[in-house]
Amino acid sequence: MSIKDTNTDSENSTEPVLYKVKMGIAYITLNTKMNTINMDTARKIVQLLTEADKNPKVKVVVLNSMGDKVFSAGFDLAMFQQGFSDKIMDNLLLYGRDISRAIYFLKKPVISQIQGSAIGMGCIMVLSSDFRFVAKKEGLFFRLPEIDIQIFPATGPTAMAVNILGVSHAKDMLITGRKVFLDEFDRWGAITKICEPENLASEVKKFARELAQKNKTLLHMIKPAINIMTFEKAKDWFDFENEMEKSYFAGILNKDEFDLDDLIHRMWEKYGKGSPKFN
């Protein structure tokens, strides 16, 4: 089911990201082919998330997308047709991280309305959200494919997978790169509610409106409090992902200068509590 009942006024828009505020709820809607994300789209998403967070009329944010089959296929691979460059990599790490950070650190609750498969950055957005409502569809899956496209999982997938799914399931998704179908994802405890496709938008709207009726100050204090208690090194984790990806990319370009053991040792020293002793 499309989300046209929540975006009837923008249904025919060609804008890559749609935005509207209604009854205290900000709807941020991807509107591209396969709901992919390029650098301009990423900047726009971050801009709208920031705008929603600052708007005193907004109490809750809903992330959704147009179409029936795909929530988001992630970053637009057309960006990489000419190969990776330092500029592309820097932009990818910057704006990709900014999306997941903005969703996670937003003081207002963020609901993902997932009507189709979520891949790459699409899956990261889902994991970064506070609530996940998913259409009950055969074949709907979640995937973090970075290992198969030979990039380190930066911009949020490692941090969010560990935080939401736990270490075991994070390793499963990130090391195998496999598709995790809805039933399994639900068993992992990642789903707020599975809805019949025709009821997805109305279920999200109902839930968002219920949240919007809560005490505004408390609503916007509780999420940051939980995040601080349970993910106190979140900022470091996002920086750590990106530093690993930059090191990996630099190693591809300068293989003779890449020392994996040295890199891991330095990362333990910087982000862990010193190098672990294996014997």
Image (cartoon, helix red, strand yellow):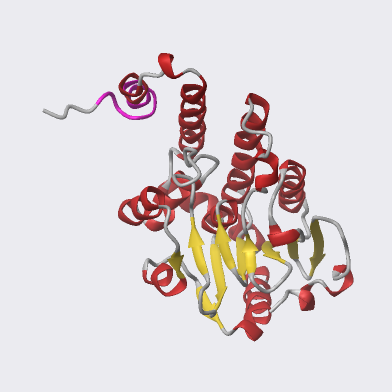
Q: Is residue 110 magenta?
A: no
Q: Is residue 228 visible?
A: no
* Image-quadrant location for residue 123: bottom right
Find the residue positioned furthest to the front: 82
Q: Position of residue 262 (x, y in %)?
A: 33, 19
Q: From this view, report whether residue 64 is shown above or below residue 175.
A: below
Camera-side residue of 26 and 30: 30
Q: Is residue 110 visible?
A: yes
Q: Position of residue 111 (x, y in %)?
A: 61, 64
The count of marks equals 0
* Image-quadrant location for residue 46: top right
Q: From this view, report whether residue 255 is shown above or below residue 182.
A: above
Q: From this view, report whether residue 56 is shown above or below residue 91.
A: below
Q: Magenta stretch: give its range.
A: 265-275
Camera-side residue of 116 and 107: 116
Q: Position of residue 198 (x, y in %)?
A: 65, 85
